[in-house]
Image (spheres, rainbow, N blue to C red):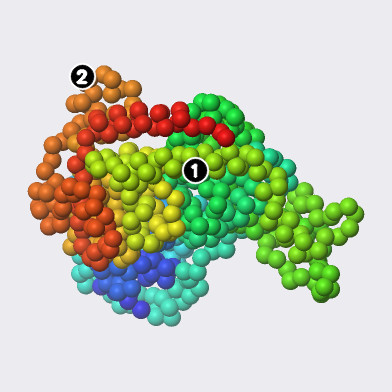
Amino acid sequence: MPIDFRNINTVWASILTETLKRLGLTTAVICPGSRSAPLAVAFAQQNQIESIPVLDERSAAFFALGIAKATQRPVVLLCTSGTAGANFYPAVIEAKESRVPLLILTADRPPELRDCHSGQTIDQLKLYGHYPNWQTELSPPSVGISRLRYLRQTLVHAWERALFPTPGPVHLNIPFRDPLAPLQQLDPDTLPSPFELEELFTNLSHSPLPITHYPLPSPYSEWQQCDRGIIIAGVAQPQHPRNYCDAIAHLSQTLGWPVLAEGLSPVRNNADINPNLISTYDLILRNPKLAQPLTPKMVIQIGELPTSKELRTWLDQTQPQRWIIDPSHHNLDPLHGKTTHLRTTIEQLVTTLSPIQKARDTVGELTDESNPSPTPPLRGDGLSGTPFPCREGGRGVRFSEFANNIGNLGENSTSGYLKQWCELEAQVRSVVDPKMATMTQLFEGKAAWLLSQILPPDTPLFIANSMPVRDVEFFWQPNNKRIQPFFNRGANGIDGTLSTALGMAHRHQSSVMLTGDLALLHDTNGFLLINKFVGHLTIVLINNNGGGIFEMLPISQFDPPFEEFFATPQNINFAQLCMTYGVEHQLIKSWEQFKELLNPLSAAGIRVLELQTNRKADAKWRKEYLIKLASGLKIV
């Protein structure tokens, strides 16, 4: 057992790291500093925990966030006392809002050295306000067995709170007295016995806790009777994307409702299993002559709403009855509509509200006339609700006949409304796709369109905020490549874009990031990770010399001060910047060159593919072309 007995601090710190290892911790991101030395040494001595030193605290925090996003398990983030921990704050906020598990350890001076102008000391209690799922300060270290048990149980609780009931950050403030270095000071007679220490770690397990699904009111019969319903697949990064997409496809085909899929949803990258997929809703809804007749009666919203302002405005104006499917405790309705939250996953909902399961709950064990033996139990827990009708004219329905009826339900009940959406989707794609294919100029939106087609299957793709996320919303083409979208849409900021993407790609398969120039410049210290980063990241850099998102806003009409205070062009030579950090750089001059460099991807290192674009011309094209395209659409 790797317990360091040199002094009280080393015992405390090694018990802490051993406990976390046994709970399932695999990665710790460590920032340099003196007060955190006992913990840094303890993590460095843990062979089964990858400990990664990172100079810049803000970059370190987003790097840890990216790793946690990719692995969906807690990552430790460690820093010294003082303002070091304050630099974690943007990533803590993002972790909270995007439900990413982080375990933040801030070293601190002991109580007697606070509020007396001792160096590098600030008030670190509740440093992150209400953003942590849970936060506490540990007692000063001790080697008494009762205090070590307290340490163990506090860590167990912290680990659980980082994961359940909703993943997010947990903050432990940890005071240390001198000596901070691992100097020999302990008298062996003061130590717990080996038996007590071994007993300390019994029953620790990194097995996931069971998720309890509480009985829900069943809306299925209401959905089934509705002939004008839509399913909205919003921003999502599910642990098992294919299962997630399967569940949505099953619900869509069973109800006969279209699926309006956000560009950041894996649904767009698993199009083969969802024939009712609508990717161009933002463009369709720009035509008021279409938006009104397409008004739904009911909406099933899965996760958060998509980025599209057009979609949000449409829902706000029409106010359909809406169900939000999401397992968290968060309020996911910024429109304050007629909304019911169903606190479960879409996978669990489809299982428990399966019409076949409902019928089975109603009539008992179904039998096929040719086989009188009972059918095997179906998955699901038989949640209470209005039974799905399973009798026809007073006679029992055979199992096979019933299943066939379910499969035809959508076609029979909602074909008109669904057909309208599908025809409009086909119209838009028949115009947008050829337009993109023949476009030779380096238009920002074409980069997103091309990525949807040329990336290798299963590629992790980090999409930066501001214009990249919107170009993906507008132009990302449905495909069967199972591309894995990653993003920081919790707080929607540009903080830590590069560092998060590097964390996502660390020890992952070869990955890609789509970003603008300002988001990359805001986090160039992320390039300092190059010597610790394991894997490959290709950065597709849209360099339009400024904030393209602001060109889409009314403030763009007021110049001055628009260009200087909002667009904020930086005039950076990215080739020289990359050379400083030892990062490969290539300037893209044609779409053919772009395609050649994106498939196959490299196996290791970081490279930047820079596309120099015209910010004002591209913004003008978006405004004029998208409105023109929408105005030409019509319901046949």
Check disc 2: other Cα within 10 Å, few if <14, some if 14-19, many if 20+. few
* Placement of the N terminus among the 4 image quadrants: bottom left
Seen in the picture, residue 73 relative to 294 is either above or below; the reply is below
Q: Judge from the rendering whether residue 346 lies leftward or rightward of residue 493; answer left or right.
A: right
The mark tally for this picture is 2
The answer to which image quadrant residue 403 occupies is: bottom right
**What residue is shown at x 21% (from left), y 72% (from top)?**
184
Question: Considering the numbered disc 2 on the image, is that residue within a helix, a strand or a loop?
Answer: loop
Say which residue label 2 marks.
560
**What residue is shown at x 18% (from left), y 62% (from top)?**
531
Which residue is farthest bottom?
A: 195
Camera-nearest residue between 172 and 268: 268
Which mark sits nearer the N-terminus, 1 or 2? 1
Look at the image and tell me whether residue 278 can be seen.
yes
**What residue is shown at x 39% (from left), y 44% (from top)?**
433
Amino acid type of disc 1? Ala
Q: Judge from the rendering whether residue 232 lies leftward or rightward of residue 487; answer left or right.
A: right
The answer to which image quadrant residue 115 occupies is: top left
Q: Nearer the viewer, mark 1 or mark 2?
A: 1
Location of residue 575 in the rendering, given as x and y in whole percent from the top left corner: 11, 49
Amino acid type of disc 2? Pro
The answer to which image quadrant residue 18 occupies is: bottom left
Seen in the picture, residue 76 relative to 333 is either above or below; the reply is below
Location of residue 94 in the rendering, given as x and y in whole percent from the top left corner: 38, 45
